[in-house]
Image (cartoon, rainbow, N blue to C red):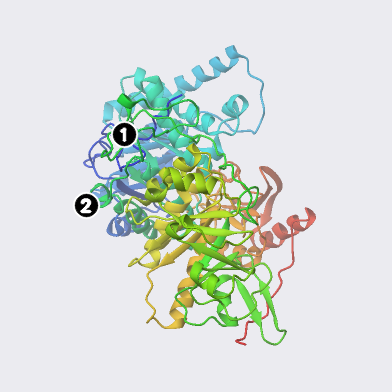
Amino acid sequence: MNKTYCPSLTEYKRRLSREVKIGDLPMGGLNPIRVQSMTTVDTMDTLGSVEQTLRMVEAGCEYVRITAPSVKEAQNLLEIKKELRKRGCNVPLIADIHFTPNAAELAARIVEKVRVNPGNYADKKKFDVIDYTDASYAAEVERIRERFRPLVQICKQYGTAMRIGTNHGSLSDRILSRYGDTPLGMVESALEFLRLCEEENYYDVVLSMKASNTQVMVQAYRLLVQKLDEEGLQPYPLHLGVTEAGEAEDGRIKSAVGIGTLLEDGLGDTVRVSLTEAPEAEAPVARALIDRYTNRAAEAKPIRPLGEELVISNEELIMSNDASPDRNSSSLITNYSLPIDPFQYHRRPTREVLNLGGQNVPRVMVDLSALDAVEYADLRAVGHLYSAFLDKFQMNDLGADYVYSGQRPVPFMLPNGLKEVVDYSAWLDAGQRPDHYPVLTHTEYAAPGARHPELNFVFQHLDSLTPTSLTQLRDDATAVIILYTDNAHAMPEIRRAFFELMNHGVTNPVIINRQYPELTPEQTQLYAATDVGGLLLDGLGDGVVLSTELLPARPKQEWLQTLDQLNQLSFGILQAARTRMSKTEYISCPSCGRTLFDLQETTAMIRKRTDHLKGVKIGIMGCIVNGPGEMADADYGYVGVGKGKIALYRGQEVIKKAVPEERAVDELIELMREDGRWIEPVLLEEPVAG
């Protein structure tokens, strides 16, 4: 099937969606991508909600969502709106509805937009597996349609917009029984509601496909756009977000991997970054992601086809001469097929070279070449800690696999598990040492000369992938490609280079190299997570190396701090893309008026006790609405069920129902201990320069 979800592979083209009016601030169409967030104050606290909304607007929020879990909160939205308008704030308000159609129908008469979750709007989730016949399934759909129809009619009458927001973790038992826990199930859950909207000639609809798993989230949004096109439905605007992204660096990286990938595809009309922090902290992150695309078309260099016989599918599609794009064209045809499946994760098949490619996890390389002289203690920045007292190294969970030292090889033996990469000329000058692995420019690689018998790295970019170089790489069992670009439209150009490798049968492992000169650490974090994470989500890439601007005059400690940040960022991106789990993952909701405990404080406390548990996923949810469903991906769950009461989960199964909050973390750890998942934390020796 043709994959038409993405406007263009090679130039930034934003999908043209239908314009939806939300108060006085329309979304979609030719309007800018909008920023929104959600209050965390109890909705019954009118002044608290108003004050927080004003802070959010000041931080850049263009829409503000407020939870309405029952009719009384829905009614109080009127008081909040009156007070905001009295203070001169006309920000459109969105009512967030779960489980309660009556609250939605009331809110739709008050606010500018309502958000409903099709997984629980008219369903009670019991986690039952039911074997539906076609007739019983159709009858259940019709029951839900009749319960939903009044809301559609009210929204149409009052000019109220609606978001149909599917969450991966809260699909109904009926959807799960037929489609499973899949992107297709997420899409079908929304389409059941959307089809009724169109039958009622109601089109002021926004759609979302949120998940805490970035692979599932991206696949679901892409599939949604595809299905809208296939069914002839309107091109509705998209609300982008990763649910329960977490806090601090991890939350930002995870959000950028999911949201940034879709923005690169040209998808998205509004963004909400969900962080376990004050809502005012979310809008600047969303704005930083969006602003990258404001002038993208003007800044990016065209990505040119490589020849008249450019193959863009590994199935049977070869362009004939009259169908080939012009050699000077900056884009491919719109109706294209892909050598990857954008709706399912499949890692690109590669040959194994040493510990790269094949079935190995993606590797992390850190660039040390800016350091004049590397000392023992410096390797702490790449996760390898040296103790002078014990005269040995210890590696933490974020220990890099390779270091690139350029022209100045490290003057001592590296710890076991860490390998060194040097420039080709330095490798030759040092006598072609077997414990050093050379990296060659594509020009050096094209020329005859000495090679390492096991592993040789080769710098390549899209334009250097000629028929001759592709053949040479394909026939070289020792070559690993370091793929780079200086194009502002970086991710699509590197993706385009991957397609060229795949279409020519080149199975060498590929390290993705991105350089970010003149960017702040915050920008580097978001941009790298987008550029590298987007490729990893499509199964592309066997490693990552991130670099920043080379300024040798910088103090060494500043460089080491930067290297530490880049190393942690590399591992964070791999984890967020679900391609290498190297640390504990926290699936924590961003808090709202339903939250039953201090989420930020509790998340920090749980992280402090458990952040050494490599690969364990812990869900931390403020209330039962965001409970077992939203943390569907988690191994363990910590969910508020009442004031001072916590339910503990193993997967989606409740193990303990009403644990006093002061004992809940200890009992969570005891549950892990019973399962054999608990490991006592080990204090690493403090490194000392040697």
Q: Is 198 situated above or below 294?
A: above
Which image quadrant for residue 555? bottom left
Which is more foreground, mark 1 or mark 2?
A: 1
Q: Quadrant of residue 664?
A: bottom right
The residue carrying mark 1 is 161
Q: Tell me the element at label 1.
A: strand
Distance between the Cα atoms at labels 1 and 2? Answer: 23 Å
Residue 204: x and y in percent read: 30, 30
- Residue 321 is left or right of residue 440, and the answer is left
Identify the residue at image location x=55%, y=79%: 378
> Do we see residue 16 in this rendering?
yes
How many residues crowd mark 2 within 10 Å: few (<14), some (14–19), many (20+)?
few
Q: Nearer the viewer, residue 485 or 529?
A: 485
**Left-right relation of 600 to 550:** right
Front one among 224 and 663? 224
**Which residue is the extreme one toward the front?**
448
Taking the view exactly as shown, the residue that stands out farthest to the top is: 135
Give the residue number, with chain letter if any, for mark 2.
86
Residue type pointed to by label 2: Lys
Q: How many marks?
A: 2
From the top left corner, tell me how far across and down residue 269 is, in percent.
Answer: 32, 41
Mark 1 or mark 2: which comes first in sequence? Answer: 2
Amino acid type, residue under disc 1 in the picture: Ala
Identify the secondary structure beneath mark 2: helix
Give how far across and how far down residue 661 sits, in percent.
64, 59
In the visual, does 142 lie left or right of 288? Answer: right
Q: How packed is label 1: few (under 14 Cα within 10 Å), some, or many (20 or more)?
A: many
In the picture, the quarter occupied by the C terminus is bottom right
* 134 sits left or right of 49 in the view: right
- As drawn, 382 above or below 272: below
